[in-house]
Amino acid sequence: MSNSSFITQFLLLACEDTRELQLVHFWLFLGIYLAALLGNGLIITAIACDHRLHTPMYFFLLNLSVTDLGSISTTVPKAMANSLWNTRAISSWGCATQVFILVFLISAELYLLTIMSYDHYVAICKPLHYGTLLGSRACVHMAAAAWGTGFLTALLLTANTFSVSLCQGNVLDQFFCELPQILKLSCSDSFLREVDLLIFGCFLTFVCFLFILFSYVEIFRAVLRIPSEQGQHKAFSTCLPHLAVVSLFISTGMFAHLKLPSMSSSFLDLVVAVLYSVIPPAVNPLIYSMRNQEIKHALWKLLK
């Protein structure tokens, strides 16, 4: 197997040895997946059906829920099927498709989170300019830029990853096709070319994180000037969970793609991958929406 074109399938992380543990793995992933489907599905439905939620904040939230649904649906169902049917195989085309869709959606989610931090910053720090800076046309352009940039990022990384020579077999120590795991199979000259792209992608991620951090620092400074303690508590209770989830998402994603080979282990790689690819789509609905009274009211109207 001197070249990736000769590999017809990859073998994902082996499921647990006993049937009982395989079923525990299946039911655990099923519970997380159903929670993500329910939470994000309710948010999308509520925002789409209630005209009072047709504002910039909820427009970006709807886009975020779409990326969360897509990203978790790209990896978890395949892992569940492998546990249920006791198999590890995924075709090379299936692996390439999984890599492309996952990188596309995770990249778009990162850019959307950056835009949402800017939305929060303008709403709290520059409320008089909110309608000007975040008009309907500007929101559509920003969302389109996030999706378009994510698509180009995924296209570039996927094309370069599957054009390299793979000379270390076809076994991936992960429950989905992850870029660092595929690069472990590549030859040294091909590996260096792809690592440059990963470092550049992580640099962009770090820039987005700095922008998010700066936005929240300015938000906290503005909140501390609020005379009402109740107003401060409300603002902090909203912003701090947002920042915590964003920090977890970005830090674990960067660690997974930049960690040294000596720091790699099957258990550590699995935990990190779950933290950046499975947990955020499941908890984002709780963090961003379910504590929001307007979302709750819209969902109650739909249920009635």
Image (tube, grey):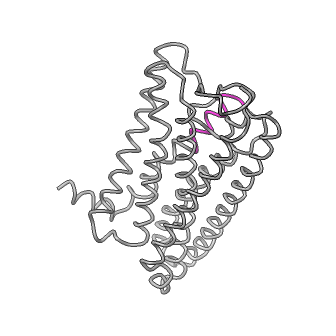
Quarter of the view holding residue 140: bottom left
In the image, residue 119 sits, relative to residue 82, either above or below, namely: below
Of the pair 113 and 77, the residue shown nearer to us = 77
Residue at left offset 57%, top offset 33%: 92
Looking at the rendered image, the quarter that the C terminus falls into is bottom left
Of the pair 196 and 301, the residue shown nearer to us = 196
Q: Is residue 266 found inside the magenta-colored segment of the image?
A: yes
Residue furthest out toward the right: 189
Residue at left offset 68%, top offset 64%: 210
Number of on-image labels: 0
State the extent of the magenta-drawn residues as a range.
Answer: 265-276
Looking at the rendered image, the quarter that the N terminus falls into is top right
Quarter of the view holding residue 61: bottom left
Residue at left offset 53%, top offset 40%: 98
Query: At which x and y percent is residue 224?
Result: 58, 74
Q: Is residue 71 found inside the magenta-colored segment of the image?
A: no
